[in-house]
Image (cartoon, helix red, strand yellow):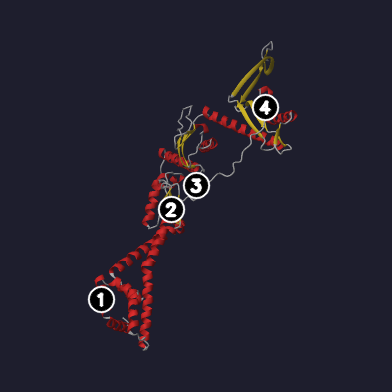
Amino acid sequence: MEWITQTFRSWGIPRRTLFIIVTAIGLLSVYYLFIKISPLSMALLYSDLELADTSRIVARLEKQGIPVDLKAEGTQIYVPTDRVARLRMEMAEAGLPKGGIVGYEIFDRKEVNTAFGFMHDIKHLRALEGELARTISSLEAVMSARVHLVLPRRELFIKEHQQPSASIVLHMRSSKALKQSKVLAIQHLVASAVPGLVPDAVAIIDDKGNLLAKSDAETDSQHQTNIEEIRMAYETRTAQMIEGLVGKYVGPDKVRAEVTAEIDIDRFSQEEERYDPQGQVERSRQIVRKSNESNGLTEENIKYEVSKLVQKQSRESGSIRRLSVAVVVDGHYLRNDKGEEIYQSRSSEEMEQLKKLISSAIGFNAERKDQLEVINMPFAKVEDHGTRPIDYSEPIIAFKHSELLRFAELLIFIIATFLGIMIVIKPLGFSFSLKKQRASTKEDSSQGHFPQMDLKSSQDLVFKSRQSQFSSQLKGNISELSQHKIKYILDNHLEEAVIVLRDWFREGK
């Protein structure tokens, strides 16, 4: 370490300043790259938080000096991985996150248990709404939910009571609309949890204001949507069935089918009562005899019931009114003597058999005026254009912005390290080698083996030393005027300069 101190002291002020600046830049670069390349391992602490809960939790974590990373617009909190479990226990002990939903835990408070009458009913309504909101929020497609219940009070001496109703607002996880089946499931879920509530009295909207379910009987638009879904599903399934059945005979790529179905969207309900006057049936017979009278009067009362026939017919929509099917079948391909491919149509008997097969599979009904056409036509050849030509205007290797920044950081670090080696470490190594040479020379001189040099060899040694070692050290320590003075002394008083240098080596300076 002593030679490092002596070398540093032998440097001039410019070199010392440069050494300090390069060292500081190198240390800062290493620290920065260490932070960037080796980031702190973070894990999810909480997600789907409200902003109020996020603010409370972050304030508590920052007070403890724990690193916090917020994502998903402040709804997710990330902390160091090794502290997740303990922090969750601490937050649970502190009652965080509180959340905006209050369930049946509201009755755990003492002041609530002492409430009666109207206040108790309000607390119970809040708890029921909170529990339903939590249950709906547990669905995969729903991020959060708000439930509003209207439970009319039952008044005395009132025959017609108002029915309960509910309104639900859903905040979805994605921009896709909720399927109608899931909307109906939510309606039945809420209706089953509230006494007297029917699914038709539950209104549901999403966070964008779209009406998902109306609080009455199924609307015409919803009914039309269901019928359209049924029609599309039936057409797709029938077309796939035809292609699969015929494709086993002609080949999977040689048949195409299109199906168009007209669905009956009308609902039919009929109730009929028929009376048959000829079909009287004795319903009851009553005979009264009076024995206390002289004539013995007897009364007989017979009641007859006219036979009645009650018929109720109900037909839901969704039945097939008319079916149209078009099937295209490819023909045979043969090769002639020249090796050319020739198309050959299928025979009429073969096409008739295919038509019978398809008509039986789809349930063809002539009374509905169904249509079925099976045509034999050559399919267009799909040309193989080979691989797509390389577009040299597009970059072969695409980098992200973050990757380019990291690459630039590594490049700057490599350049700084190289400059540090060239400016600082290399001169230190040279000074260390010069120090070893001086120590070796001093040892030889102390043992009396210092080489005797004549005037000519001394001159050569001085000139070489001046050009390499001695000159490189002087440039960093003395001014240019002093260098000229030393050069003048060496040129005019060479013998004295050799003697002085020899004394310096002996003294170990």
Closest to the observer: 369 or 372?
A: 372
Residue 204, x across and y down, in percent: 48, 35
Closest to the observer: 164 or 475?
A: 475
Q: CA distance from mark 1 to mark 3?
A: 67 Å
Q: CA distance from mark 1 to mark 4?
A: 116 Å
In this rendering, the label closer to the viewer, 3 or 2: 3
Residue 152, x across and y down, in percent: 45, 32
Residue 409, x across and y down, in percent: 41, 57
Q: Residues within 10 Å of mark 2 (few under 14, many from 20)?
A: few
Question: Could you tell which of marks 4 and 3 lies nearer the N-terminus?
Answer: 4
Closest to the observer: 312 or 39?
A: 39
Image-quadrant location for residue 283 = top right
| Residue 373 numbered tag | 4
Looking at the rendered structure, the kind of residue marked 1 is Tyr
* Residue at image mark 3: 392
Quarter of the image that includes the C terminus? bottom left
Question: Could you tell which of marks 3 and 2 lies nearer the N-terminus?
Answer: 3
* Residue at image mark 2: 404
